[in-house]
Every structure is written in C-alpha cells, then in structure tokens.
Amino acid sequence: MQNLFSRLSSGVSESEQLDIIMTNMSPFFISRLALSEVSSIRELKDVCARLELAKNKCEFRGFLNPGDTSIIPDVCKVNNRPSASAVGNNNKLCLLGIVCLPIAYAGKVEMIDFYVCEDINAPIILGVDFLRKFDLCQDIFADVGNMVCHESMNLIKDNEIHLHEVGDLTEDQRVELELVVDRFRELAATDSKLGFTTLEEHVIDTGDSSPIKQKFYPIPFHHRDYVRREIENMERLGIVEKSNSPWNSPILLVPKANGELRLCLDSRKLNSVTKIDSYPMPRVEEILDSLNNAKFISSLDLKSAFFQIGLEQSSREKTCFSVSGLGSWQFCRMPFGLVNATARMMRLMDKVFGPEFSGSVFYYVDDVILISDSFSNHIKLLHEVVEKLKNAGRLARWAIRLSQYNFIVEHRKAAEQAAPDALSRAPASDELFKFQASVLALEGDSWYSGMFKKVSAAPGKFPDWRVIEERLYKRVRNSNPLAVDCEWKLVVPESLRNEVLKQCHDRPEAAHLGVFKTFKRLSQSYFWPKMINDVKRYVKRCQVCLAHKSVNVPPPGLMENPKKVQRPFQVLSTDIIGPLPRSYSGYKFILVVSDYFTKYTQLFPMRSSLAKSVVSIIENQFLMRHGIPQCIIMDNGPQYISNHMKMLKAKYKIPNLFYNCRFLPQNNPAERVNRVVVTALASLVGTDQRHWSDNIHKIEFAMNTAVHEVTGYSPFLLTFGREAVLSGDWYPDRELSVEELQFVDRDLYASMLLHLKPLFENFNAAIKKSYHRSRTYYNKNRTQVEYEVGQVVWKREYPLSDADKFFAKKLAPKFKKCVVQRKVSPVSYELQDFHSGKSLGRWHIKDIVKSEPDN
C-alpha cells in the first residue's frame, strides 16, 4: 500500500510540514494532532488533516482545511438553491443549501454558516473562518518567522504512512498474526527466487507490422557493470534469454524512488504498432474512499509483478534488445514499458481475486490493500488471500519443470490407470478435522467420559486439562525448544485410538515406521493413558510390517541330534554350484556328491543343470561305483524334485529322499563342501576365470586326501582302507620283476582291513565329541520354538530380482502368510499357503515366524 500511495502523492519534507502546521494554528488548545490517522500525504495546503479539539467539556471532531480562506468560496445563497463547488482538495461537491449554526467553544458562541453537501464522509468540516472567529490561529498568510515551535509534535517522515501498528495488538492477536505472516513467508520472493503464474500470458499483437529495429542507447561507463549484473541475474531467473530476433528496441536506466536503477525497455516504437487493450483500470479515488471506515488495513506488494507473467512464445522476439558487448536478448516474461502491460496485470489480478473479494480487497496494478471491520475477519481474509496467491502459482512450478519435454496430454480411462491419479483421488483437506470432531463419541470409555465431565464442571481444579469445543485436551510440556509439538494434546477416547494409530502408522506419510517413531509422531498431537503399550501392540500386529520387515530376534530352533550312520555311503548329500563363467571346456556348473559318513566327495563338471543330466551323473558315476544309499539329502531345487529323481528312487528302491527348503550348512554337508570348493577355485583360477574347470579334479583329490578336522582321518582312508599314495617316492627305489608284480600279499591287505573296525569306533567317538562341541556353541543364543498343526505363521521369502518383469527383490515382501500342515521334525515343518492352500514343502524353523492377530 505504501508503494501505491507513494506513487500517487509527492513527499513533503519535515521542514515544510512544520512551516504549514505552525503557521496555521496555535498549539495551546490542541489535544492531539491526528496526523497518524491520515491515509495519504500531500502538501498540507491540498489535504484535509483530521484535528481533535477538546477543552472545557466541549468535544467535537472535524476536518481542518487550512488551504482555503473559507471552508467554501462564495456561492449563490438565493432560495437555498443547490450549486456545485470545489473544496481545497479539488473534489466537486453538490451543495443542497445553507444553514447557520451556533458554535460554542471555550465559553464563546459564534454563528457560522455551513453548507449542506452530498457525498461527504465527515459530519462537519471546519475551515479557517472557524479558526479566525475564535482566534485560534494566526493569519495563514503571515510570515513564517512568527510561528511558534512546538517540540512535542510528531512530524511524518517522507513517504511514511502511520497505520495501526502491531504494538497495539493483544498477545492472542499477535500469535494469530504471526501465523499468517508465516504463511506469507512461503510466498515471499527473494533475489534468487521469483514467482510465476500460468493464469495469464501476455501477447503482443502487432498485426501485419514489419519488424522494427532501433539502435541501442549508449550505456554510461559507470553503469555498465550494473547492466551486466542485472542481465545475468534476469537470465538466471528466467526473465530474459539469448535472441536472434529481427526486432530490436533500446533499453534505458530509470531511477527508482529509493535511488536504485531499473532496467526498462524503451518500447515506444513497438507500442505504436501494438493493438491497444482497453481493459478497465480502477479509480484511485474510489479506492481511497473505500478506506475511510476500515479498522484494520494490510497491504501487499508483489515483487517484480510484471516479471511473474509469462510472455507468449511468438511475442518474445518483439521484445529483443541489444547491449554493447553483451549481444542481443529477448524477454521471456512481461517487461516494463509495454503499452498493454498494466492492463494485463489488472486482468490477472481480477482472475486471482474475483468478485468474491469485492469490498474487502482492493488492488491497483501490483499493490494490494486488504481491509476489514474486525480483527477476526481480517485474519480470515489474510488466510484466503494467501491461498489465492499460492494457487495462482502452483501449476506454474510444474509448467516450468515440464517445459523441457515434448509431450501430449491425453485422457486415460479409469480401467487403463496403472495407479489412482492424484488429482481425482486426492483426499479431502478436512479429513483430519472431521476425525478430530468425531472425538465427541464418548460411549464405551468410562475414563474419558469421567475426565471430560470433571474438567467441564471444575476447570480451575485441573490446570493441565482443558475442554475446547467439546474436546478434551491435556497439557504436555516439551523441554526441547526446537520441537514442533503442540503443548495441548488432544485426548483420544478408547473407541477411536485404533483409528488414530492407523493414521499415524499406516498412511504413506507415516510409512509403517517402528514403535519409537510411531509413538513420537502420536505424541506430537495426541494423548491417552499407556499410549506406548497400545503402539507396541498395534505395530506388532500390523500385517504389512510382518510381511516386509526383518525379524530382529535370535533365530529359533536347536541343533538336531546327530544322524545314526554306521557305514560309508549309507547317507549321501548333493548340491549344485553355479552358474559359473563358461570354461574353455564348455562347463558352467559343478555337481557335488558327498558321503555323510566318511566325508568322501566327488565333483562333476556339467555343461547344463538339467534334471536329466544331474540324475544321469548320480546314477552312472556314483551309485554304480559305490552302491545304493539309504538316504540322499538335497534341497528343493527343480533338478531334485523332478520326475527323473523320483524315477531314480523307484528304480533302485532308495528308501528316503530328504528335502528341505533353504537348508542350514549343518543339515546339508554338501553346502559346507561348496564353500571349500568355491574358495579353492578362486585361489587357483587367476585372472582368466574360464580356466576354473582345469583344476576341478585336483581340488577333489586334495579334499579327499586331507585329514578331516572332525574325524582325524582322511576321507580316502575311511573309504578305501588305506591312505592314497601322493607321490612315486613312496615306493622302493628299484624296479620290480615280473614275478614280484604277479605276487599279491592278500594276508597283509586283510590285516589292514581288520584295523578299520576300531578305526570306525574312534571315528564315531570323534563325531559325537565334535557334535556336542558344535551344539553348545550353536544353541547358545537360540530357543526351542514349536508350532501346532493348523497354526497361522509367516514364512520367509527368497525372491529373485527380474529386470524384464520390473521386479526387485529389495521391494518384495520378506514373509508370506502360511498355515502349518505337518510337523516333520523338531526344526522342520511342512507349510501350505494361507489363501490358496497350496503346499509349500518343508521349511526349517529359522524361516518361520509366529503370526499375530490382525488389528
């Protein structure tokens, strides 16, 4: 508003004010010179200044008009015929007649003629003729040297308007006003940020006119740096851009009222060929008249308002200007100096505010004035204006970001939507308010109902409790000065606590966080007794959290008893390593087959991992050499659960094929062997990993001839009854004759075999000792957990990422809801899907988690 009035009136210096004031009145009778209530300042000879007189129980208020020798010049008084005349501020008044009234002041009564007028805001205007009648002032044309100085008078500074200040507000009003100011700060422009609106776009319509090119004006040397900085800043803000336009207009520097310079486009030639926009402009007099009865006034000034309106693409080249040494530029935003710029600005302001703000919001170009008759209405009006201004620029932010792409906006049917769109599925803004209003439901909560009645009946006895708009609040102070918590927390009855927990935990803004974070979020606005316990219960039972969050507890399940194996190749274990880099021999996989009793292992390189190939190798290269086992331990890979493996079992009548999902290493010895094989391959392969298959049988030989840390013997010895000969140096250093080669000392070999029985006994003792040592360590941080048949549980998932299907395992659920179908062992269960009933096979107890009832 200040900028508006400053543009409409010229400033009056302090010395001139003092001259005029003290020349026209004696200060002894003045109770207060109410210049602070003036809405604009001009030369005091042309402005009516309000004056309050109070003396001898005589009080009245009028307008002092020292600019006239009479309140109204001589007019015709015949038959009280109306006439028209002008007062000191040049306003035309319609005179209805003349009335002579007695005026009493300080015990003196004088008859004074008053003119009855229409359309005048003050009930009475007292002119210099009144002051002369009562000898209240010197001659207004007297020499200024006779004036009396009055030091207590407060003079108005240049271009300063004294309005209702914040210091006159109550504490509650200050708080409300500060909240509004905070909202305006969101819209505040800075040197590095400028608003933009898409409600209006300026078009320069030049018809069929040919381009106009003018020479640029020379820039004074001491202003060149300023021009360069200003253009660089405007380019950074998106106001100007480089140009190759045939149009060209000069620029010039225009001083502002504060002494700074403004870079303006001299578009007079361009304006001469532009079609005029005759959009109506408001009358300043009407705006000023509307302010007379306002009790609360606020003003807004839009920073660089013209630059917040975009310039239509074909019109940009018409604003081209040149600067020596900086090249040619053109405006992307509406510049100063265009003939229709003011009309465009007024059209935008009418769109932003509209008729609903008529009588309360006034604007002239980029200055906005808000008036109200009460403080509450004024605060409400300020909030509404904030929303209007914010909405005017909201779409513009996305328009700027999307302008770099070429795209077509098309309607997509609801059936084709990949996800609900934000515009049509946006939640109502008053959703939370409606929820809070429903807190009035007190049924079923005796504690809440009792507390509500106690506080309502005797609020003085409960200083930390309060009932506001039929809602119960409790004061909970926070010692953290940076906290954003409300001091007064809304108390939630029991029937609505689950809904509050859902709002503060399940919504996307809450993100299903843990107990501590959910409790802190609740504590910012809500309160009820034992709230932390309810938060723990709710989060523990949240089905989404159970499916997606890791279990931060020690794994369940104790180590099983050792398997009762009496001889070699009674129990086998098998697994597959790969895929590995394709070797020069064409291999990609390794089939591992290991004897559970002796730890004897064989490694078979494979070109594919098809079930047919795996079963063929197990049958022909292992079973046909070492015999049929009683049990084969394997995982549930597709090769092992295939029909080929089932046919192998039926063909040789193998009693057991033991499957388990995601075996632990101690349950499948082949997985422990895999670690040794992979480590050995990595140590020997070198830089060219395609040579890995060259050493596969050497690694097998090394593993079988090495002494095992558990048994104390090598797998080769336990399998064949003798140690393998590692080098020819073991044999005598002489050649054997044919007769010696034909002789076989069978008795010697038989005696060696007799030593295998006590060796196996020692072996079993070593196995038991190793088992007890491992079990003590394994069971140290574990507990035994048992599940009943039919019990609902959660099974750990092991998904694999698939880029072709746009699926990432990191975003997939970590658990799946299942039902216990059968207990296989103390640490193994058969599960089925909770929803479909499909069997999911056997799962170790480490991958099973107890389920909780749904909230």
Image: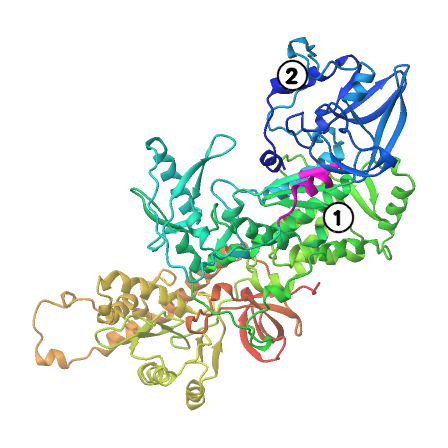
Find residue 206 and name its label. Answer: none
Q: Position of residue 775 (x, y in %)?
A: 50, 59
181 in relation to 314, above or below: above
Q: Earlier in the sequence, mark 2 or mark 1?
A: 2
**Alpha carbon separation for disc pair 2 and 1:** 75 Å
Q: Position of residue 564 (x, y in %)?
A: 48, 72
Is residue 373 at all visible to an observer of this figure? yes
Is residue 785 at all visible to an observer of this figure? no
Left or right of residue 838: residue 738? left
Residue depicted at 88% across the width and 36% down the height: 79
Residue 638 magenta-drawn?
no
Find residue 19 and name its label. Answer: 2
Residue 285 magenta-drawn?
yes
The extreme bottom residue here reads 651
Mark 1 lies on residue: 530
Left or right of residue 90: residue 108? right
Kind of residue sitting beneath label 2: Asp
Q: Quadrant of residue 849?
A: bottom right
User: Badge 2 local density, few (<14 within 10 Å), some, or many (20+)?
Assistant: some
Q: Which residues are magenta?
A: 281-298
Q: Position of residue 6 (x, y in %)?
A: 59, 33
- For the image, the number of numbered tags is 2
207 vs 390, nearest the viewer: 207
Kind of residue sitting beneath label 1: Lys
Query: Quarter of the image containing the N terminus?
Result: top right
354 vs 215, nearest the viewer: 215
